Image (cartoon, rainbow, N blue to C red):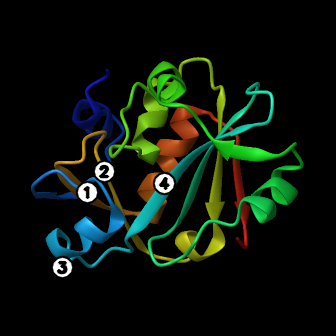
Amino acid sequence: MKDIYKILADLDIDYVKHEHLPILTCEEGLEYRKGLKGLLIKNIFLRNKRGQRHYLVVIPQTKEVNLVKVRECVRDSKLGFAQEEYLKKYLDLVPGSVSLLGLINDAEKHVQVVIDNEVWKSDLICVHPNTNMATLEIKREDLQKFLDHCGNKVYFYDL
């Protein structure tokens, strides 16, 4: 796994780091993330029916993912949750640590990113630094810089 802090520094991306106990669910995260200024998000790792394409869906923590809506947006077959082995293979992450910052490990640019417009309206966004033991508050402009650096396909939709 690449050192995400070195990459953020190399890209001149500022962040505020908040360390906490491991967070496995969004509900657990609410307790540890009180007082954060950034938008709390959740990341869902999906695959299409045949498993040829994988998607990282990013929505506000308060929103439920609508798989039919995501499928319509990306114009793909039925979507479902991807198996842990593919999360490890493409993003080098484990469940509970899924993050936009994991894209740095996707050298082949296999994973496509679907970001809810509500997330992208926020000036400050909370992301895991590829571990569920910390949360980083990063400006949207800096996340855009990171996404541009990674080079994965990114879609913005009203989910």
Q: Which three-letter amino acid code belongs to the residue tagged 4?
A: Asn
Mark 4 closeness class: few <14, some 14–19, many ≥20 residues within 10 Å: many
Q: Give the numbered dot on residue 136.
A: 1
Marks 3/4: CA–CA distance: 19 Å
Mark 2 closeness class: few <14, some 14–19, many ≥20 residues within 10 Å: many
Placement of the C terminus among the 4 image quadrants = bottom right
Residue for point 33% across, 43% down: 97
Q: Nearer the viewer, mark 2 or mark 4?
A: 4
Q: Position of residue 105 (x, y in %)?
A: 44, 24
Q: Give the numbered dot on residue 128.
A: 2
Looking at the picture, does residue 32 appear above or below residue 114?
A: below
Helix, strand or loop for disc 3: loop
Q: Which residue is mark 3?
A: 34
- Circles 1 and 2, Cβ within 8 Å, touching? The answer is yes
Query: Who comes first in sequence, dot 1 or dot 4?
Result: 4
Query: Who comes first in sequence, dot 2 or dot 4?
Result: 4
Marks 3/2: CA–CA distance: 15 Å
Closest to the observer, 110 or 150: 110
Q: Which residue is mark 4?
A: 43
Helix, strand or loop for disc 4: strand
Query: Who comes first in sequence, dot 3 or dot 2?
Result: 3
Mark 1 closeness class: few <14, some 14–19, many ≥20 residues within 10 Å: some
Looking at the picture, does residue 102 appear above or below residue 28?
A: above
